[in-house]
Image: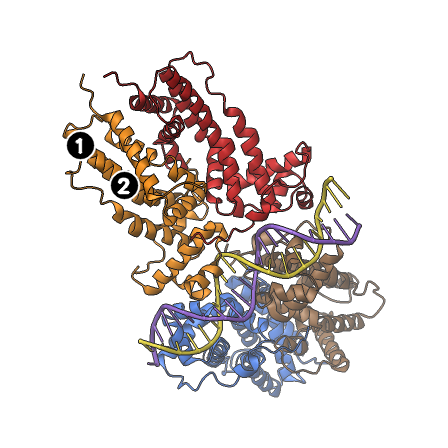
Chain colours: A red, B orange, C blue, D brown, E yellow, F purple
DNA sequence: AATGAATGAGCTTTCATTCAT
DNA sequence: CATGAATGAAAGCTCATTCAT
C-alpha cells in the first residue's frame, strides 16, 4: 500500500500542452475523451476509441496532447473549471427563511451529485487518485470546495444575524454537505437501487435541513 | 440503473471456482491479488504482476480461478466477509453514556475508513461499480450495511430508554455515519493532506457525536 | 513451403510405448483420444480434454503414452489395424454376376467412405500427413490398400475366367475405387450438401459398375 | 451434417476487412500467411510466425485483417480466385482429336493437383472443413467446379458432334476427373512415394483417357 | 496541422508436460 | 500406478505511441 509508484502523474501535471484552450479541435477531442473516460475509466479507455469518438485521427490526438495521461488530466481540469464553477449560485438573496434556503441547497446538492456526469467524475477521480493526485486536488478545489465556501459564507451571514449559533461555519458547512449524501447519493455511488424521485429528494432535503437546524439553532435558556 | 450492460460481472460473481476456501495456495494468491488490485485498480492490474506478487506461476492463477474477473470478485468477497464483518462489535454494553458510545463509534469509524485497506476497497468498488455491480452490492451488504444495522440497533435501544428521540433510527444511523465522513475521511479519499492524528480524530468524533445528540435529544418543553 | 520441419513426427513413430495393448485403461484412453482428435484435429485437441473425455487424470495419459504425438499415432494405428482390417470381406463367392458384385462393392465403398468415422480419419490423415508421415502410410496400408488388394484379387479371378479383359488388375482396381468417389464421397469430404440416400447411392453404384464394365468387357470383333 | 456449429467461420468469411485488395502490404501478408498456413495448417500456424514470415509486425496483421480466422479465409479466397480460376483454358480449340484432348487434360490435371500449392490447399481445406465450411465451398466453386464445368462444356460439344455417347456430361466429367486422381495424385495426398515423372504422368494420362473413351465411345451395333 | 499505417511491448489465457503425493 | 497442482512457454490479440506522407 502507499507504494508511492506515482505512475504517469508526476509528469502529467501542470498544464496539458501549451494550447490556446480556445481551439475547436481541442474542444472536440476533449468532448470525445470525456465520453470515453467517463464510460470506461482511465485504463479502460483506448486512444483509438477516443479518436473515433472525437471524429479525428489518432495522430491528431498526439498533436494536441502529450499522451493519454495528459489528455485525461486536461479533460478533468476542463470539467472542474468550466462545468463545476458556474454552479456556485446558491441564494445570494437572504430573504428566504434559513430553513427554506437550506432545503433548496440540499435538494440542489442531491440532484447535482446524482447526475450522471457528477457520478462519473466522482468515480474516476476517486478511483484514479493514486495515479493522478493533483487531479483530485483540482477537482476538489473547483468542485466541492467552491460549493463549500459558498455555503460557508451564507452560514457566516446567518450567524451574524443571530439566527444560528455556529462556532466553525466551514466545518459545519462540510458537515451539512455530508449529511446531504446519506441515503440517496451514497447508494447511487454504489450502484444500488434507490428512490430518487423529486418527492423523495424533497423529503430527504427537508429532513436534513431540519436536522442541521436542530444542531445549530440558538438555545434560549 | 441496474442496466443490463453487465460486462464480465454477471457470470464472474457468485463463487470463484468451487474452491474449499481453506486452500493455502488460494490464500496466497488472493493476498497477492489484493496487493496489486488495491494499488492499481482492476484494469491497471496485470495477471503477470499478480502471479509474481503471489509467488506463483501465471498458470497457477488459472488453476484456482476462472480468470481475472473471477479472481477480482473472489478477493472482494473474501475481504467483505472476513475483514469487514468482524468489526461489528460496537458497544453491546449499554453502560457507557450515550455520548461516550457515539464518540467511540465515530472514532472507530474514522480510523477504519481511513485505513489503507478500506480506502483502497472504496476506491476500487466505486470505480468499478459499472463493471462489477454485484461486487458493490456485496461490499455494501457486508461492509457498510452491517455497521449501519449495528448502530441502528443501538439507537433503537436508546430510544426505548427514552434517552433519544428518533423517529427513523435507520435513517439517523446512516446520517450519523455520513457525518463521520466529513473533514478527515472525505479528504483522504481525495488524497488530500489532512491531520489524521489520534487527537484530531478524537476531537472530530466528539464534535460529530455532540452534533448528533443535539438533533435527537429530547426537548423538555 | 516444404520447409522440412518435420516436427514431432520422427520421434513419435515406431510403436507408442511398450504397452501390452490389452490394457483396459489404455483402451479407455484411446477411445477418449479418438473422440477428441476426430472432432478437433491434432492441434485443436488438448490433453486436458482427452483426459476428461477418457475419464482419467492428465498424469495417467503420460503414464501410458509418451506424449500427445505418441497418443495420436497410437490411436490411428489402432484404428487402422482393428477397425479397417475386418472390412475386407468382399465377395469370396464368385457366384454372383460380375456386374452385381461390382455394384455391391461400389455401394459398400460409398457407404463406408461417407461414414463419420471414415470421413474423420480421412480428414485428419490428409491434414496431418506432413507432421505424421508414417501415420498416413499405416492408414494407407491397413485401409485403402487392403480393399484394393481384395478387389485386385477378385478382378484377377474374373480375368482368368475370361469375363473381363484387364491388363493391370491392380491399376484398374484403383481406378474403380476412385470412380466410386465421384459425386457423393468427394462432396461429403468438402462438406457440401449431397443426396446420399440409399437410392442415390445404389443408382450411382450401378452407373459406376457399368462404366467400369464398358472399359474392360471383352470386345468380340 | 450441415450442422450449425459454424465456429469462427460464419462471420469470418465473406470479405476480409474491406481492403482494396491492391494493397502491397496486404499482398505481402497474404504471401507470408500462405507459406505458414500451407506448412502447418490452421491451428498449427501462429500469428507471430506469419508476421515474421511476412516481414511485418504482429500489430500490422491486425490492422489489415480482423484476426487469424479472417486472414485464413482471405488467403484461401485469394488463392481460389486468382490461382485456380485462370487454369480453365482447356482446349477451346476442338481441332485436336478427342483422345489427344482428354490426354492433355488429364496430364494438366495431374500436374496441377500434385503441385505443392494444390496439395497444401487440398489438405487444409479437407482438414478444416468443419471449422470453415464456406471456405470449402469457395474452394470447390472456384477450383474444382470450374474445371468441371469446363470439361462438361467440352464433352457436350463432342457429344453434339456425335463422337461420344454421354447421357449426363456433367457426371461423366466428374467421373473423368476422379479417374485422373488414381495412382499418382491419391498417393501424393497421402505422402506416399510415387513416380511422378512426366513420362509416368503421360502414360497414366493416356491410360485414363483411353479408359474414358471406352466407356463413352458410340457402339456401332 | 492532420492522417493512419506500422510498431512492439504487454495483455489475458491456454496448453503440453512434470512431479510430489 | 493414479493423481492433479504447478509450471512457463507460447498463443491470439490490444494498445499507446511514432512518423512518413
In this image, D47 relative to A142: left or right? right
Q: Position of residue B23 (x, y in %)?
A: 31, 63
Given the image, what chain letter belongs to the residue carrying mark 2? B
SS at mark 2 in the image: helix
Dot in front, 1 or 2: 1
Establish whether labels 1 and 2 are both on one chain: yes
Q: Residue at x 50, y 33 (%)?
A: A141
User: C10 or A46: nearer the eye?
Assistant: A46
Query: Is residue C142 visible to us here?
Result: yes
| Residue at the disc numbered 1 | B158
**Residue A83 falls in image quadrant:** top right
| Residue at the disc numbered 2 | B147
In this image, A12 relative to D170: left or right? left
- What whole-number distance in Å separates the C-alpha atoms at marks 1 and 2? 17 Å
In the rendered image of this protein, does residue D35 appear above or below residue B206?
below
**Residue D93 falls in image quadrant:** bottom right
Q: Quadrant of the C terminus of chain C?
A: bottom right
User: A169 or B134: nearer the eye?
Assistant: A169
In the rendered image of this protein, does residue B133 appear above or below residue A109?
below
User: A11 or C150: nearer the eye?
Assistant: A11
Amino acid at each position: 500500500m502507499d507504494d508511492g509508484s506515482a505512475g504517469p502523474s508526476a509528469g502529467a501535471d501542470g498544464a496539458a500542452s501549451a494550447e490556446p484552450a480556445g481551439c475547436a479541435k481541442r474542444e472536440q477531442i476533449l468532448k470525445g475523451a470525456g465520453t470515453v473516460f467517463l464510460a470506461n475509466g482511465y485504463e479502460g479507455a483506448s486512444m483509438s476509441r477516443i479518436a473515433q469518438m472525437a471524429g479525428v485521427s489518432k495522430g491528431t490526438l498526439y498533436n494536441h496532447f502529450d499522451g493519454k495521461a495528459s489528455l485525461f488530466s486536461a479533460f478533468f481540469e476542463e470539467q472542474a473549471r468550466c462545468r463545476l464553477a458556474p454552479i456556485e449560485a446558491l441564494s445570494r438573496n437572504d430573504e428566504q427563511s434559513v430553513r427554506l434556503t437550506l432545503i433548496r441547497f440540499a435538494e440542489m446538492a442531491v440532484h447535482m451529485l446524482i447526475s450522471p456526469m457528477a457520478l462519473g467524475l466522482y468515480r474516476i477521480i476517486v478511483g484514479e487518485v493514486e495515479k493522478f493526485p493533483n487531479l483530485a486536488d483540482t477537482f476538489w478545489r473547483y468542485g466541492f470546495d467552491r460549493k463549500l465556501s459558498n455555503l460557508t459564507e451564507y452560514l457566516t451571514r446567518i450567524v451574524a444575524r443571530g439566527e444560528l449559533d455556529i462556532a466553525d461555519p466551514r466545518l459545519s458547512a462540510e458537515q451539512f454537505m455530508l449529511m446531504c449524501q446519506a441515503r440517496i447519493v451514497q447508494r447511487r455511488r454504489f450502484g444500488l437501487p434507490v428512490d430518487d424521485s423529486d418527492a423523495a429528494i424533497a423529503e430527504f432535503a427537508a429532513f436534513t435541513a431540519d436536522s442541521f437546524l436542530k444542531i445549530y439553532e440558538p438555545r434560549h435558556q
